[in-house]
Amino acid sequence: MDDDITTDQSAHVQLSFFTNDKSLDHLPTTIFDVPTSADCEQINSLVNKSISLENESWEDKRFEFLIGDVFLRTTLAEFISEYEFETEVVVKVECVLGLEAPKPLHDYQAPDWVSSVHAANGFVLSTTYSGDIVVWDKKGQQTTFATKDGLLKCSVLVKKPGKSMNGSEIIVGSEDQLLTLYTIKDDKLEKQIVFRGHERSVECVAANSKTQQAISGSYDFSLKLWNTRLDDVSTVYEKEDENDAKLKKRKKSYLTKIPMVTIGGHKDRISAVHWSHNNNSHVVSSSWDHTIIEWDLELAGELSRIRGQKAFTSIDIHPSTGMTISSSTDPLPRLYDLKSRDGSLVKQTFYGHEKGWVESVKWCPNDEKCFVSVATDKSAKMWDIRSGKTALFDIHGHEERILCCSWSEEGIIATGSADCTVKVFDAKR
C-alpha cells in the first residue's frame, strides 16, 4: 500500500482523532477519509505526519487507537466486521500514547511453588510452599532463608530493601495459622515477632507503616489486626502454666503477640486484604464468599459491601484513584469503584484469559489505567482499563499456572508460578 493511505481506492471510513492526554496538544482536528484496509502502523504514520505539519519539532511516537472500548489490533475492515461498528457516521478514535511490551529480564528457579512475590529497588523476593523466603539481588545472586514455618501462603514487605537486603522487614503468613515478622540482618533472617490467633491457614496480609500495624485474613473467615511495634508490649502473649518459670528463665529472641482486634463478617476464606490509601482506619477485604467488604477498624464494623457473581481470589486498590481491580474463579478481571453510588458496581470487565480463573491482579503504581493479571491458563496479561476486550500485551513463559504477581514503582513486573519459577519483566515507561 502507498504510504499515503488516503489515496487507496478501496472502501473508506471517516475517522476523527481525539485524546485525553494534555501533552498531545497538536493532535489533528481534521476528519480523515481512510481506507478500511489500513492497519495500526499506517494510521500511526497518518497521525504523526499530520501532527508534524503543525509542529515542526514533533518527534514520531507510537500510538494505540481506542475505538469505543476496544484497541485496534487489525485492519479497519477486520475490526468493523468483528465488532459491527457503524461506518455511516464519523468514527471517533482516541489516541493513546503506546507503551513498550514488557521485556523479559530474569528467569529464577525457586525450590517449590511460589506463593507470593515482590520486586523493590532491584531485588526480587518470594515465598514458597516449601517454607522458604528466597531473595535475588541485582546481579541475580540467590539467597534462600529457611523459615521452618511450614508452607508459606502470603507475605508483605514492611520495610523495603535499600542498597542491600539488610534492614529489610517482611511478614509472612503460613498454613500453620501463624504470621511472623522477620528482619534481614547481617545477611541472616532474624525472627522479631510471632503473631498468634488465627485458627486456620493465613491467606493474606497487609501492612501499614504509618500506624505500624498489620492486618491478616484467614481460612477461618476472620480478619485480625496486629501491632507490629517491637517496643509496644500491650498485646504480647505470655503463656502462664506450670512451665512458666522455666520459660521466663529462657531468654526469648522474639515476641509473641495476640490480635488487637478480630473482625468477623465473611462466610468463607478471605483471599486478600488492603489498607485504604486515604484512611488509615479503613481496610478492604475480598473473600470466597463472593463479597468485597470495606471495614472501619476503629468501630470493628462494616462500611460497605459488594457482592460478586463468583468467589474473589484477589483484589488490589490503586494508590491514587482508589479504584479496585479484582480477580475471581473465572477468567475475567473486573474493575470496581467502591465509592460509586450510581448503582453500577462493575465498571469494566476484561476479556482475554482463555480458561480456568485469574489468580491475582496488581495495579501499576505509576499509572492509574494499567494493571497486570495472572491466571491458571499459564499466562499473564497487561491491561488498560479503557479497553475490556483487548489486553495491551500478553506475557508468556510459565509452564504451569501462575499463582502471584507484583508491579513495582521501578516498573518491574514479577510473576511466580506452580512451575517453581519466578519470572521478571521490565515494564518501565
Image: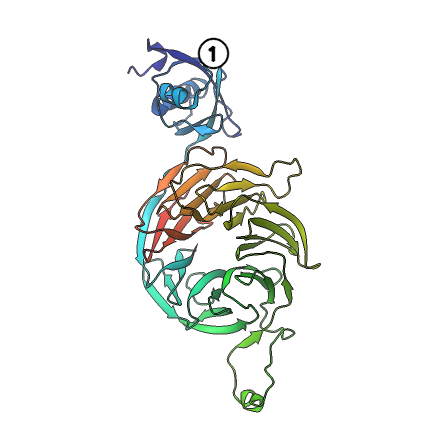
Direction right: furthest residue: 299
- Residue type at mark 1? Glu
- Residue 403 relative to residue 309: left or right: left
- Residue 131 relative to residue 299: left or right: left
Relative vertical location of residue 364 with respect to residue 136 in this rendering, above or below: above
Residue position marked by numbered label 1 in the rendering? 88
| In the foreground, 118 or 204 | 204
Q: In terms of image quadrants, where is residue 112?
A: bottom left
Badge 1: residue crowd in 10 Å (few <14, some 14–19, many ≥20): few
Relative vertical location of residue 282 with respect to residue 131 in this rendering, above or below: above
Direction left: furthest residue: 1
Q: Position of residue 35 (x, y in %)?
A: 37, 14
Q: Position of residue 185 (x, y in %)?
A: 44, 71
| In the foreground, 99 or 25 | 99
Q: In terms of image quadrants, where is residue 273?
A: bottom right
Relative vertical location of residue 172 with respect to residue 349 in this rendering, above or below: below
| In the foreground, 152 or 32 | 152
Q: Position of residue 80 (x, y in %)?
A: 41, 20
| In the foreground, 267 or 346 | 267
Quarter in which the C terminus is drawn:
top left
Secondary element under disc 1, as helix, strand or loop, is: loop
Residue at point 52%, 77% (across, down): 254
Q: Is residue 132 visible?
A: yes
Q: Is residue 170 visible?
A: no
Q: Position of residue 34 (x, y in %)?
A: 39, 14
Quarter in which the N terminus is drawn:
top left
Q: How is the structure coloured here?
A: rainbow
Total numbered labels:
1
Relative vertical location of residue 88 with respect to residue 166 in this rendering, above or below: above
